[in-house]
Image: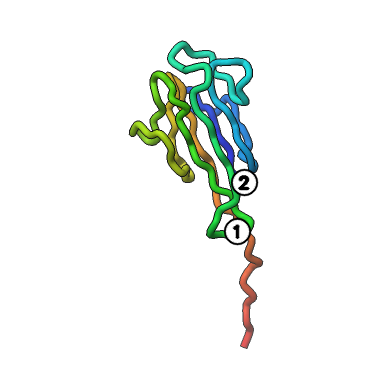
Amino acid sequence: MAYLALSVEDVIINKWLLVEGNLSIGRASSNDIQINDAAVSSKHARLITEPDPFIDGQLVTYLEDLASTNGIELNGNKVSREKLNHDDVITIGFNQFQLIDKPTNNLDETAIIIS
């Protein structure tokens, strides 16, 4: 299961589980993730989590800029809309988030054949 982690000096101080649907990010109190930072627009960005069109039962998350003043960075590059992957670093204002999406291993242990 994927989640978004907010870190300060490599210490996770908050995290949000990414389930199907949208999460709004910004300075306004109406956002799902409120950031108290003057460099963040009131409605800055959105995370869109939806079913993966290629893998049954999996979700995929997109990051979308909502025409914010200072934009968003993904792994150091300005973006407007991008698919997120495990360990991606998102910068919004002076805040750094990381997407954590460690794959789950749903396979049973391999049977050992004794001959």
Q: In the image, residue 71 lies at what x, y percent?
A: 40, 25
Judge depth for marks 1 and 2 and give the one in front: 2
Viewer-closest of 48 and 58: 48
Residue 36 sits above or below residue 46 on the image: above
Furthest toward the top, the residue is: 38
Residue 52 sits above or below residue 32 on the image: below
Dot 2 alpha-carbon crowd within 10 angstroms: few under 14, some 14 to 19, many 20 or more: few
Residue lying at 49% horizontally and 13% vertically, measured from the top left: 37
Q: In the image, residue 8 lies at what x, y percent?
A: 49, 23
The residue beneath circle 1 is 105
Is disc 1 placed on a helix, strand or loop? Answer: loop
Q: Residue 32 shows which numbered tag?
A: none
The residue beneath circle 2 is 1
Amino acid carrying label 2: it is Met
Residue at mark 1 to residue at mark 2: CA–CA distance:
11 Å
Q: In the image, residue 105 lies at what x, y percent?
A: 60, 58
Residue lying at 62% horizontally and 82% vertically, measured from the top left: 113
